[in-house]
Amino acid sequence: MKNLVIVESPSKSKTIGKYLGDNYKVVSSVGHIRDLATSGKYGLGVDIENGFTPNYTNVKGKTKLIRELKKDVKDSDMIYLASDPDREGEAIAWHLKDTLGIDEEKYKRILFNEITHDKVLEAIEHPTVIDEKMVRSQETRRILDRIIGFRLSKLLQSKIGAKSAGRVQSVALKLIVDREREIEAFQKEEYWTIDAKFIDPEFEADLFKYQEKDIEIKNEEEADLILKQLGEQFVVESITKKKQSKNSKYPFITSTLQQEASTKLGFSAKKTMSIAQKLYEGVDLLNETVGLITYMRTDSTRLSDDYTKSAFAYIDANYGKDYIGYIKQSKKTENVQDAHEAIRPTSVNRTPESVEEYLSKDEYKLYRLIYMRTLASLMKAATVDKTTIILDNHDYKFKVTGQVLIFSGYLKVYSEYESSEDKILPEIIEGNTYVSKEVVKEQHFTKPPSRYSEAKLIKEMEDLGIGRPSTYAKTIDTLKERNYVELIEKKFAPTEIGVETTDKLQEFFSDLINVKYTADMEDDLDKIAEGDLVWNKVLQEFYDLFEPRVLNAFDAMEKKAPQETGEVCPECGNPLVIRNGRYGAFTACSNYPECKYIKKEDVEQIEVMPCPLCDGTIIEKKTRKGKVFYGCDHYPKCKFASWDKPLEENCTECGNYLVEHKDKIKCSKCDYSKED
């Protein structure tokens, strides 16, 4: 019997292919093979008038791949659709089944949370079917994002020159803009502290109360008045010792992994997810190829019984029974999606040290963080002996605190990722009097709220229920690419266009582009996946609210005048202005379309070939970021543009021009590639 297994990643297919026998062929779809078309009303690829029916088209450049997949399907007796175990993976499986024309009785859906030999074979033995409700939920999200993205982006591009807007992206940007305004509006307040310093024994105590009431010192005059009332002698009023437990944290979910990798390793969310993907899909070790971690897109903190049992045995063998903790109950949140397991090592016996030689430096760092966090989550709490000492000086109360670690617990393996410094106090006796060396005052000022770091922004989005953890990295990356934010000391500050974009969206869409509406929409998507809401009714309710506001904004939003350069057009005498095009900014006449003058000095004119669309010449140009592309020198009259270098040679199959694409020559239209 011939079996075909289709996964979405080439790396994943390579790993799984080594687990299955000769009766199985494992191939990759390289992600989605279909997406919404850009046809129809507003180019949405959605028939709004007929129940929001989507119009799908094959992803550009995948014609040849689809043809090969269809041949593989035809030659196989059973097809296993093995895309990732979440909504996106479910949608990929559904599109594969539909596009490749796979019969209902000829396919099986298989799911695994880790790519290991046993789990893959177990999935083959226990197949299921595509979850249509999850597919509808993903489809609804895609349509929502398309409608909001296309309509608002077109609006902003035409009115203020902003590049894009999005359902989650614009709310994340608003958080950054709102925080910046809090910082700008912040009025700092002065306050003072008073500390007593002692030599025999050596310690310091901080003033915190007067006559059992908390004390605030607002200015230097108040501080000086207190100093005058203090003597040199301090009486130890009380010493309190208390044992405290410090519990380990839950194992990682997507968002907490991104946060911890950011703060502890200095990784961006994008980098973290890229490395985690590699660790999940498979690493070549000495005698095997295996996924080192479980699926890295998850909201669940649950650990499997098998892993927990093996981890407890490992802790017992390496640290002793006293370090064995307990199984934490899965952390419930309102927006838990597709919960499987937390992100954990696939085997507790594959220690970071045992696989280090097979990993890059950054892969090792991330794997070690995941391994130690998971192991620590199953270990006992650390115990500290906390001591609080209160000293009295003329009814002014001073406090000294310290702690000593008396049982390391989970810190035995996780201490390098947490600050747990002991502050050991000297022997101080209750009732004794101690003479201070000096009592000092110090001025301070309250500080404004801090800008968001990447880790803090991710945590805020998660806490507010905005988007999904699997999309946070992409959302943050988009804000950077659109030049809506800039990094100042590794924290996000909005740019001028970022602030302007937020203000315009809030002026016309404040009831839609906000935290509550976005979080509520996530809840609705969850309910669609659970079968509690009808997908196109959710879309209709949204569209009935959204589209009238868009039409109003197109009429009422003031159009921003382009920035003048201070030069005049040599052809008509009107001012020259900076305009934004598809490939970056360029200088042109303000009297467009009557005058179509473009300042040629803005581009490096390296002639490439005659334009295939008009009588112009294709020239090499550069975007503002320095990326090379090829366009017609008759722009904007001729809109020809290509990232690939056109050649003065035609395709032998369809007659269109050839282009240089990476390391090969191919046709600009069909799938023809020229052999070396």
Image: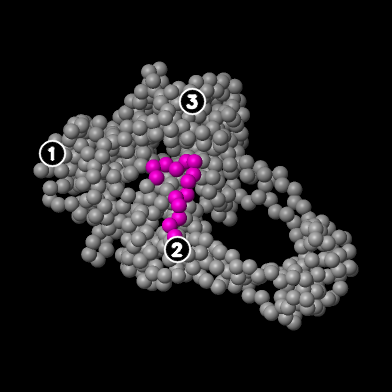
Q: Is residue 327 magenta?
A: yes
Viewer-proximal residue among 569 and 136: 136
The residue stretch that appears in magenta: 326-339
Circle 1 residue = 77
Report x, y in % for residue 146.
Answer: 43, 30
Q: Is residue 208 left or right of residue 645?
A: right
Query: Residue 542 has which mark?
Result: 3
- Image height check: is 315 above or below 162? below
Circle 2 residue = 325
- Image height check: is 447 above or below 480? below
Residue type at mark 2 is Gly
Residue 403 placement: quadrant? bottom right
Q: CA distance from mark 1 to mark 3?
A: 44 Å
Asked whether residue 594 appears in the rendered view, the answer is: no
Residue 100 placement: quadrant? top left
Q: CA distance from mark 2 to mark 1?
A: 49 Å
Viewer-proximal residue among 345 and 390: 390
Q: Is residue 665 magenta?
A: no
Q: Is residue 282 left or right of residue 193?
A: left
Residue type at mark 3 is Phe
